[in-house]
Image (spheres, rainbow, N blue to C red):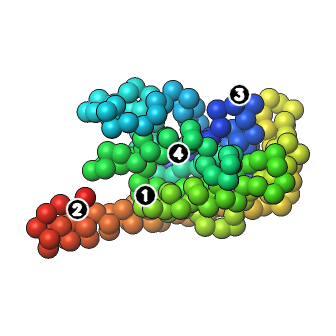
Amino acid sequence: MPSVLAISGSLRKDSYNSALLRALPQLAPEGMEFDFFEGLAGLPLYSEDLDAAEPPPAVARLRAAISGHDGIVIATPEYLHALPGVLKNAIDWASRPLSEPAFCGKAVLVLVATPARVNGFRALADASALLTGLRNVVVPAPEVVVNAVPDVVVPDGNGGWRIDDPMTRAFIGVQLRILADLLETGAARALQSSFQRRTAELAGLLGRPLP
């Protein structure tokens, strides 16, 4: 099974979402391994003026990391009922160049962790809609928002993290197995391949490339 790229939508040193990602290997199916990307803080705000033939080094690293993985797991907080700006900015960069975007044709799992007891589902919906629109296949259910996260994601006593709630463990375990199934079947790659073929056919009918 190919390794999965894990991206945290929080830059905070003691981020609960980063801790949640570090707890996932304990729940993952056999053979699933994780690479952790930690370069979002170095990304400039997206600008077409910067998106040249040689983009900024931090952007090149992000695009290369995403391009090199068929599976992506994102854990993000919810800020003001939506995605954090740092994560949206990363997706903006990874959705380009339009001719060959890095973040396209991937199998994606989105998790949300928040200290609050009622927030999170709007960020989950926000991320899922955005990534689906980029022609990725997002694990649709069971949806997982880890509320009251300090009580759920706790130190494991060995310098790592574990998920202390049995229901959360069970739900995330199911999600990771679905992600593994998507990777095994190549469903996300097939979607992107079909899109490319059919839009090329349409462009031929129109006599011009599609925008």
Amino acid, disc 3:
Lys
Q: CA distance from mark 3 to mark 2?
A: 43 Å
Closer to the camera in the image, 11 or 140: 11
Amino acid, disc 4:
Lys
**Image mark for residue 210:** 2
Name the residue: 76% across, 55% down: 119
Determine which residue is flagged by label 3.
13
- Residue 165 x %, y %: 86, 54
Lower position in the chain sequence, tag 3 or tag 1 = 3
Q: CA distance from mark 1 to mark 4?
A: 13 Å
Determine which residue is flagged by label 4.
88
**Nearer the viewer's eye, disc 4 or disc 3?**
4
Lower position in the chain sequence, tag 4 or tag 2 = 4
Lower position in the chain sequence, tag 1 or tag 2 = 1
**Nearer the viewer's eye, disc 1 or disc 4?**
4
Name the residue: 38% across, 27% down: 56
Determine which residue is flagged by label 1.
134
Lower position in the chain sequence, tag 4 or tag 3 = 3
Amino acid, disc 2:
Leu
Circle 3 sits in a helix, a strand or a loop, which is it? loop
Circle 4 sits in a helix, a strand or a loop, which is it? helix
Name the residue: 80% across, 29% down: 159
The answer to whether mark 1 and mark 4 are in CB contact below 8 A is no
Quarter that holds the C terminus: bottom left
Q: From this viewpoint, which residue is outermost toward the bottom?
A: 205
Amino acid, disc 1:
Leu
Left or right, 144 with reference to 57: right
Circle 1 sits in a helix, a strand or a loop, which is it? loop
- Residue 17 x %, y %: 71, 42
Vertical arrangement, residue 136 with respect to residue 198, above or below: above
Lower position in the chain sequence, tag 3 or tag 2 = 3
Closer to the camera in the image, 1 or 98: 98
